[in-house]
Amino acid sequence: MHIKTESIPWIIIGSYFLFGSVWILLSDTILYHFSSDFLANKQIGLYKGWFFILLTCLFLYFLLKHLLYKNEVMENQLLESEERYRRLVESSPYAICLLENDEITYTNRTGLQMVGVDSIQDLYVNRQSLIANSEDTERFKGLLSKIHAQEDPSSKTIEYQLLRSNNEIIDVESTLIPIMFNHKATTIIQTRDITERKKAVKELWEAKQLIQAIISASPIATLALDMESNIRLWNPAAEKIFGWKSEEVIGKKSPIVPVEEKDITIPEIIEYGHIVNKEVKRMRKDGTIVYTALFTAPIQDENGQINGIMAAFMDITDKKKTEDALLKTEKLSAVGQLAASVAHEIRNPLTSVKGFIQLLSSDNDFADKTPFLSIMLSEIDRMDSIIKDLLVLAKPQAEHFTFFNVNTLLSYVMQLLSTQASLYNISFITDFTEHHESLYGEENQLKQVFINLIKNAMEAMPDGGVLRLKTIVKDNSINVIIIDEGVGIPEHKLKTLGEPFYTTKEEGTGLGLLSSFKIIENHQGKIDFTSTVGIGTTVTVCFPIERKT
Ligand code: ADP
Ligand code: MG
């Protein structure tokens, strides 16, 4: 049975009263029952009184002793528990303080250290408030009244800046807990320093911004893929090189692997580790192929598990082109050297053979052989023209550069080829520039170039057609454009043009374009072919304009 503390005095007094009354009544009744001697009874009554006092003294003694002991035990327990809580609060890494009536009445050691003072009395030395700025003060006050409001008396957390005693400002986070203490509304404030956390978050954010800026500004197409090959990142360079906008590809499978190429799978990449500078073909949005150098690196999650791949593609199409051009130049110079030796060896004997045949044709004894002799002569002329082509390749001839009008030159070439043109049912249409800009160069060599190009165009139109010749002056250059309606050139063959001995004709030499390219190059010019099979070919030759000074 549990007895309430406040009823104990009543119980003791009640028991004492009850026991005393019973004692008096009972002892007196017994006494008067056995004796009627008044004096003797008075004497015994005195002893009985003394005895009662003795008894109650003993009773009081043990009762008080017991109560005092109990009190001491309780006091000890209270002290112990208070000490435990005090230590808990004192050793807390949080600053813990009590706020009563806008005044801090208690703070633990961490709280003092946080502010940078030695005692609670110094908290407000040199400053009005511990909160660094007025907006934070207003927010703090607002929150205080809110947590003590009847409708929502729960604890709340607030971030603000705290002013330390050395005027340093730190970022802190406080949890305000409303309690009733001595019938007064009091707040426990638990505060921790979050400056480091804020700094780390800021540094992380800055690092992220930096990486984002680097990836955005990088000229290298950079993408991140997850383990299912879905695109997670697609930078502006990737947009530029491959043509897809980032919003078109994010979250989808990579569209850049051409159908004929085998894609490198994520497990393969993980197995190889890093891929460095691997040449791969990739596809643009318009379907064209782009040559790239691939670099990869794995992306890890916080447990060190690979959860994606970073892939960087460097556009090396230009490099590839340069390499191809270099290869061609090497071939060219080899052919040039060969041509030089062969051409010289053949030209001289050929000249004498030609002379003798001419001699024979004028001899009447050989009159019946005239058709054969003229065939021999024309064949020798053909051989001579091949040698002329070869000699262009064979190192510098005496070059004689002059200024001349390109329209006049083309008209001359057209006249030269007019017989052949009408034979094949080909008509020329010209569209010449009105400008009177001059070309500066070796006129005979350039004549040769245009003869080669126009002949090729005519040879591409065995059933006749229209051959357009245009000259345009633009951006400090003269462009000559030759458009035919011939058989055209398949795209994969365009690269082959100008390679020694590449010909598709039975009678062809495969040297015409080679020597033309060489001449154009010597004139700092450029040549470009566009062609559609069955529709025709457009050849554009472009020379820089050199002005007479
Ligand atoms: P050849 O005329 O002796 O064949 P070229 O060097 O002049 O040698 O030309 C090489 C090849 O380029 C030709 O055989 C032909 O297949 C192709 N070619 C050049 N120009 C044209 C053109 N205008 N149309 C179609 N094919 C062309
Ligand atoms: Mg030719």
Image: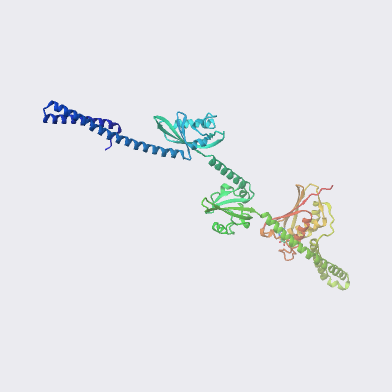
- Location of residue 77 in the rendering, given as x and y in whole percent from the top left corner: 36, 38
Residue 536 image-quadrant placement: bottom right
The chosen color scheme is: rainbow
Q: From what the image shows, is residue 28 above or below residue 492?
A: above
In depth, the one of 238 and 549 nearer the eye is: 238
In depth, the one of 193 and 515 nearer the eye is: 193
- Location of residue 374 in the rendering, given as x and y in whole percent from the top left corner: 82, 68
Residue pictured at 78% horizontal, 63% vertical: 336
In depth, the one of 350 and 458 nearer the eye is: 350
Residue 327 image-quadrant placement: bottom right
Residue pictured at 37% horizontal, 37% vertical: 78
Q: How many numbered discs, if any?
A: 0
Q: Residue furthest top?
A: 38
State left or right for residue 225 relative to residue 536.
left
Q: From what the image shows, is residue 516 above or below residue 73?
A: below
Q: From what the image shows, is residue 180 above or below residue 424?
A: above
Residue pictured at 72% horizontal, 60% vertical: 328
- Location of residue 331 in the rendering, given as x and y in whole percent from the top left corner: 74, 62
Residue pictured at 45% horizontal, 38% vertical: 89
State left or right for residue 533 relative to residue 386.
left
Q: Which quadrant of the figure contains the N terminus?
A: top left
In depth, the one of 153 and 402 nearer the eye is: 153
Q: From what the image shows, is residue 232 above or below residue 389?
A: above
Q: Residue furthest bottom?
A: 365
- Location of residue 29 in the rendering, given as x and y in whole percent from the top left corner: 14, 30
Q: Is residue 461 visible in this depiction of the protein?
A: no
Q: Is residue 76 visible in this depiction of the protein?
A: yes
